[in-house]
Image (cartoon, coloured by chain):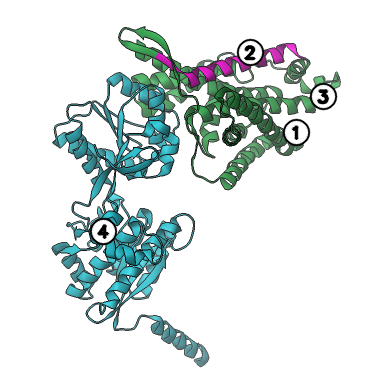
Chain colours: A cyan, B green
C-alpha cells in the first residue's frame, strides 16, 4: 500500500465520521418503505406523523436541550431490503429506530438491531411473531393481530349469548392467530364453538362451507383472514339464503370487501383501531398534521411512537437498555392515548373498536 | 338428506365449469397429442374479458341482466377464441413436427407469459363483480329442510348442457367434426386425402378457447371475484378432469368434470374441507392405477 492510497483511505474515513450525526443530537431512524409501490403511500403517512412529532419536540426545546433528528431508512417493505436498511442504521451509529412499517420488514430488521443493541419501536407491524422471540429491545406501539381476536371474542360472548358460534380461518399466520386467540377467549367465557373449520387462502368456491354452516344452524361466524375470502364466503352464503352474521378483523377495512360481498355484506362486523381523528384529545395534532396532507391512523400512531420514545429517552438517557427498562416501567401520554408496554414489548390493551359494514361503508357499530 | 341434495347441486355447478374447460384440453390432446398447458390461462383471459364486457355493458346502460349476459357471452367467446387462435399460431404451429416435448415446453412458457401479461395489464389485485344474478328458486322441501337452488347455478348447468349438446353434434355431424376425427386418427393420412390439417387444428383451438371463455364468464358471475392466477388451479382441476374421464374423449371430459365437482362437494360436506383437493387427486391416482386410459378413454391401438 503506497502513501497515496493510505492518504485517500484516511480521507474517506474522515468523511464517513463527518457524516455521522453531531454529538449534541439525538437521532431516531424511521424505518419505512419510502419508495416502491402502493405501500410507499402508507410509508408517507408514517413519515408525516413522525416528522410532525419531531418538529413539535424540537419546538419545545428538544430532548433535554438536544435536538432530535430523524433519518429515513428505506426498507421498501421487503425483508431483504430491511436488513440492509438496518445495517446502514448500525453503520451510522444510530441507537433508536421508529418502525419498521411492515411486519415482515420489522421481523427481519429486528434481528440486526437485537445483535447491535439498538432499540426499535414499530407503530404498525401487527404480526405476533415480532415480539414473541424474546428480544428485549423490540417494542410495538400498536395492537397485535391476536389481540383483535380477543376483543372480537369478548364481544361475541357478550352480544351473541346462547347463539351458535363457528370459528373459521384461512390457515395463514394472520388468520389462524386471530382464530386461535378468539377460540381461547371464547372458551374462557364458556362458549364452545359449534363448528370449527379452515379454508384455503386463494380458494373461490366456499359453497361446501356455506352448506355446512347452514346445516349446523350457525348464527355467528368468527372469521380469521382477509377480505378476499370472507367477501366470497359472505356472497355465497347470501346466495344460498344463509343469513349468518360474520365477524372478522381489520383485514376487512377495505372497500374491496364490499365490492366482492355485495349488499349481503351489510351487518358484517370487524375489529379495527379506533379512528384517532375523531378523538377530542387529538384535535390539535390533527390540525398540525393537516397542514401537510390528510393524515390517517398510521400518521397518528407514528406520531405517538416518537412521542413515547422521546419521553423515555429524556428520562432514561441515551442507552437503549435503560430506555427499554423505562418503557416497560412507565405509562406514556401520547396523541393516541396512554401507552403501557408489557414484558414482551407489546401494548397492554390497545384500543380496538367494533366496526360494522353498512351501505358500502364502515362505521363503529351501534349494536 | 336435504343437506346431501344441497351439496349435490353445488358439486354439479362446480363440475360444469370444470367440464367446459376440460373439453379444451381433451380436444387438443385428441388431435395433436399435446397437453395445452396454457389452456387454464385462456380460461382466465376469458374471465377478464367477460368482466370487462359486463362492466362496459353496465356503463352503457344495458339494464336487462339476461341481455347483458348474453351479449357478454358472445363478446367473450369471440375475443377469447381470437386469443386461442393466436396462441396456437405463435407458440405451437411453428413447432409442429418438432420433437414431442417442444410444444409442451412452449405451452408452459405461454402459460407464464399470459399470466404475467394479465398481471401487468390489469394489476395483481382481485377484481370484483357485484352479484348480477341473485334470485333463488324453491324446489320444495325434504322434511324440514328447505330445498332451493340459486338462479345462477341453474344458468351455469343449463348453459353447460346446451353447449355440450351442440358441441357433440358439431363433432359427430359436421364436416369440421369429420375432419377433426380424421386428424385424430391419423394426421398424415388425413392430409393425404385432402383434409386441411392446419385449419382443422386452428379451429380446434378456437372452439376450445370459446368454451373456456364461456366457463370464464360463468365463473365470473358465479364467484364475482377474479385475478390473474385463477387459471392455474382451474386449469389443473380441468386437466385432471380430462384425464379422469379419459383424455381425448369429449363425454369423458364432461363426466370427469362433474365427478371432480361432486367429489369436492361431497368430501367437503362429510369430511374436512381443507383436504378436498387431496381427495380429488387421490381418486385420480386410484382410477389411473386401475384404468390407465381413464373412465371413458379408449385403449391406444398400437399401429403396425
For marks 1 and 4, give the CA distance.
63 Å
Label 1 secondary element:
loop
Decide which of tag 3 and tag 1 comes sooner along the chain. Answer: 1
Left or right of A258? Residue A310 is left
- Quadrant where the C terminus of chain B sits is top right
Task: Identify the residue under disc 4.
Answer: A141
Position above or below: B98 against A124: above
Let me know if residue B123 is in the magenta part: no
Q: Residues within 10 Å of mark 3 (few under 14, many from 20)?
A: some
Are discs 3 and 2 located on one and the same chain?
A: yes
Q: Which residues are magenta?
A: B148-174
Task: Identify the residue under disc 3.
Answer: B196
Are discs 3 and 1 located on one and the same chain?
A: yes
Residue at 37% x, 74% y is A91
Task: Identify the residue under disc 1.
Answer: B96
Decide which of tag 3 and tag 2 comes sooner along the chain. Answer: 2
Chain of the residue displaying label 1: B
Residue at 48% x, 33% y is B130
Task: Identify the residue under disc 2.
Answer: B165
Amino acid at each position: 500500500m503506497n502513501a497515496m492510497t493510505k492518504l485517500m483511505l484516511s480521507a474517506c474515513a474522515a468523511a464517513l465520521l463527518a457524516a455521522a450525526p453531531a454529538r449534541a443530537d439525538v437521532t431516531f431512524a424511521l424505518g419505512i418503505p419510502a419508495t416502491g409501490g402502493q405501500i410507499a403511500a402508507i410509508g408517507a403517512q408514517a413519515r408525516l406523523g413522525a416528522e410532525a412529532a419531531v418538529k413539535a419536540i424540537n419546538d419545545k426545546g428538544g430532548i433535554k436541550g438536544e435536538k432530535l433528528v430523524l433519518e429515513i431508512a428505506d426498507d421498501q417493505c421487503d425483508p431483504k431490503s430491511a436488513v440492509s436498511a438496518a445495517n446502514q442504521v448500525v453503520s451510522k451509529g444510530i441507537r433508536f429506530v421508529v418502525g419498521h412499517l411492515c411486519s415482515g420488514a420489522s421481523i427481519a430488521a429486528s434481528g440486526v438491531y437485537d445483535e447491535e443493541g439498538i432499540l426499535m419501536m414499530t407503530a404498525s407491524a401487527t404480526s405476533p411473531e415480532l415480539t414473541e422471540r424474546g428480544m428485549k429491545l423490540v417494542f410495538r406501539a400498536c395492537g397485535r393481530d391476536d389481540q383483535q381476536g380477543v376483543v372480537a371474542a369478548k364481544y361475541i360472548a357478550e352480544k351473541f349469548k346462547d347463539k351458535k358460534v363457528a370459528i373459521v380461518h384461512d390457515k395463514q399466520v394472520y388468520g389462524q392467530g386471530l382464530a386461535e386467540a378468539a377460540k381461547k377467549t371464547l372458551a374462557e367465557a364458556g362458549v364452545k364453538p359449534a363448528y370449527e373449520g379452515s379454508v384455503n387462502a386463494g380458494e373461490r368456491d366456499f359453497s361446501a362451507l356455506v352448506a355446512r354452516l347452514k346445516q349446523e344452524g350457525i348464527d355467528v361466524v368468527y372469521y380469521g383472514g382477509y377480505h378476499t375470502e370472507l367477501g366470497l364466503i359472505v356472497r355465497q352464503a347470501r346466495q344460498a339464503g344463509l343469513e349468518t352474521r360474520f365477524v372478522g378483523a381489520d383485514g376487512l377495512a377495505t372497500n374491496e370487501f364490499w365490492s366482492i360481498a355485495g349488499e349481503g355484506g351489510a351487518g358484517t362486523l370487524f375489529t379495527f383501531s379506533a379512528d384517532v381523528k375523531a378523538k377530542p384529545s387529538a384535535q390539535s395534532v390533527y390540525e398540525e398534521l393537516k397542514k401537510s396532507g390528510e393524515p390517517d391512523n398510521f400518521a397518528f400512531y407514528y406520531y405517538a411512537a416518537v412521542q413515547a420514545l422521546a419521553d423515555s429517552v429524556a428520562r432514561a438517557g441515551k442507552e437503549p437498555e435503560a430506555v427499554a427498562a423505562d418503557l416497560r416501567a412507565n405509562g406514556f401520554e401520547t396523541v393516541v392515548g396512554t401507552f403501557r408496554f408489557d414484558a414482551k414489548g407489546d401494548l397492554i390493551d390497545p384500543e380496538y373498536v367494533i366496526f360494522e359494514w353498512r351501505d358500502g361503508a364502515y362505521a363503529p357499530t351501534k349494536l | 338428506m336435504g343437506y346431501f341434495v344441497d351439496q349435490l347441486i353445488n358439486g354439479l355447478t362446480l363440475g360444469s365449469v370444470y367440464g367446459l374447460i376440460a373439453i379444451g384440453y381433451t380436444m387438443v390432446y385428441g388431435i395433436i397429442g399435446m397437453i395445452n398447458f396454457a389452456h387454464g390461462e385462456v380460461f382466465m383471459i376469458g374471465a377478464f374479458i367477460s368482466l370487462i364486457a359486463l362492466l362496459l355493458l353496465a356503463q352503457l346502460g344495458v339494464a336487462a341482466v339476461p341481455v347483458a349476459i348474453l351479449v357478454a357471452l358472445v363478446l367473450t367467446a369471440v375475443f377469447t377464441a381470437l386469443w386461442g387462435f393466436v396462441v396456437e399460431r405463435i407458440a405451437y404451429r411453428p413447432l409442429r413436427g418438432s420433437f414431442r416435448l417442444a410444444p409442451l415446453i412452449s405451452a408452459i412458457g405461454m402459460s407464464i407469459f399470459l399470466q404475467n401479461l394479465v398481471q401487468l395489464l390489469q394489476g395483481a389485485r382481485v377484481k370484483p363483480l357485484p352479484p348480477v344474478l341473485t334470485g333463488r328458486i324453491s324446489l320444495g322441501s325434504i322434511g324440514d329442510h328447505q330445498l332451493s337452488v340459486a338462479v345462477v347455478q341453474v344458468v351455469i348447468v343449463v348453459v353447460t348442457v346446451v353447449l355440450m349438446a351442440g358441441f357433440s353434434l358439431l363433432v359427430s355431424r359436421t364436416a369440421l367434426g369429420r375432419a377433426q376425427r380424421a386428424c385424430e386418427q391419423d394426421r398424415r393420412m388425413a392430409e393425404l386425402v385432402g383434409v386441411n390439417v392446419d385449419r382443422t387444428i386452428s379451429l380446434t383451438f378456437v372452439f376450445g378457447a370459446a368454451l373456456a371463455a364461456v366457463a370464464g364468464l360463468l365463473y365470473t358471475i358465479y364467484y364475482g371475484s377474479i385475478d390473474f392466477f385463477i387459471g392455474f388451479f382451474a386449469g389443473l382441476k380441468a386437466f385432471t378432469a380430462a384425464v379422469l374421464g379419459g383424455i381425448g374423449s369429449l363425454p369423458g371430459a364432461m363426466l370427469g368434470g362433474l365427478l371432480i365437482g361432486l367429489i369436492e362437494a361431497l368430501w367437503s360436506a362429510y369430511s374436512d374441507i381443507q383436504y378436498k383437493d387431496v381427495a380429488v387427486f387421490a381418486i385420480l391416482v386410484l382410477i389411473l392405477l386401475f384404468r390407465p386410459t381413464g373412465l371413458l378413454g379408449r385403449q391406444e391401438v398400437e399401429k403396425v
